[in-house]
Amino acid sequence: MRQWTEEEEQKLRQMRREGRTYKEIAEALGRTQTAVAQKINSWKKKEKERIPKNIYKEKIFSTNERQKKPPSKDEIYDKLVLALLTEFDTLRSQLSNLPPRYVKIKPRLYTNLFRCTEALLRILKAKPAENDIDDWAEIIAEKLPSHMAEPRKLLKQWTPKRKKL
């Protein structure tokens, strides 16, 4: 198996951007279709390793959780904001990629996006120095749609048992 030269890789990228098939690329570069597919897949794999699937989720789970130390109020606040941003990003993505045949659920998605935005704004205004975790739990219980589990789950870990989220 011969190595890919930088020139061949650049040509491969260019042809792929142009929408050429594996067969056309293979013929132009004097390679097999399998070799072309493997090279492209190796790029995709490297790209997936480099970029996390969800930019916010990676930050939610810190080393403190792995060590079972109780997190500080600031850490809880940061995790809650990141969880809300994740929910917001998910809803925004669902709305932008919604196929036309699902137009009936669009108003519900907009409502959920609006409620998530309201919760996020109120949480951002309720800074850790001035508010308590119970205050944040009330905001989440009041504003956030019930199916958005991640922010609720985070708060359940640190709120007294009497609170129902």
Image: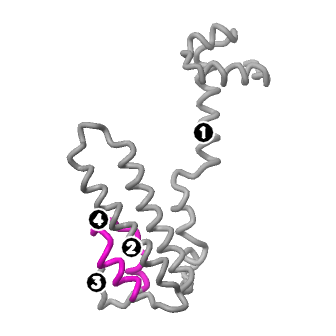
Q: How far is mark 2 from mark 4, CA to CA?
A: 14 Å
**Residue corresponding to mark 3:** 164
- From this view, report whether residue 51 is shown above or below residue 141: above
- Residue 24 is situated, as x and y percent measured from the top left of the image, at 58, 10
Quarter occupied by the C terminus:
bottom left
Work out whether mark 1 precedes mark 4 in sequence or the reverse, and give the earlier one.
1
Task: From the image, give the main secondary structure of the stretch colored magenta.
Answer: helix
Quarter occupied by the N terminus:
top right
State the mark number for residue 147: 4
* Residue type marked 4: His
Secondary structure, mark 2, is helix
**Residue corresponding to mark 1:** 45
Q: Is residue 141 magenta?
A: yes
Q: How far is mark 3 from mark 2, CA to CA?
A: 17 Å
Secondary structure, mark 3, is loop
Q: How far is mark 3 from mark 4, CA to CA?
A: 14 Å
Give the foreground label among 2 and 4.
2
Disc 2 residue crowd, few under 14, some 14–19, many 20+, Cα 10 Å: many
Query: Which image quadrant for residue 22?
Result: top right
Secondary structure, mark 4, is loop
Disc 1 residue crowd, few under 14, some 14–19, many 20+, Cα 10 Å: few
**Residue corresponding to mark 2:** 119
Disc 3 residue crowd, few under 14, some 14–19, many 20+, Cα 10 Å: few
Q: Residue at x 29, y 65 (%)?
A: 147
- From this view, report whether residue 142 is shown above or below residue 147: below
Nearest the viewer among 107 and 150 is: 107
Question: In the image, which residues are magenta?
Answer: 135-158
- Residue 121 is situated, as x and y percent measured from the top left of the image, at 44, 73
Work out whether mark 3 precedes mark 4 in sequence or the reverse, and give the earlier one.
4
Q: Is residue 116 magenta?
A: no
Work out whether mark 1 precedes mark 2 in sequence or the reverse, and give the earlier one.
1
- From this view, report whether residue 107 is shown above or below residue 80: above
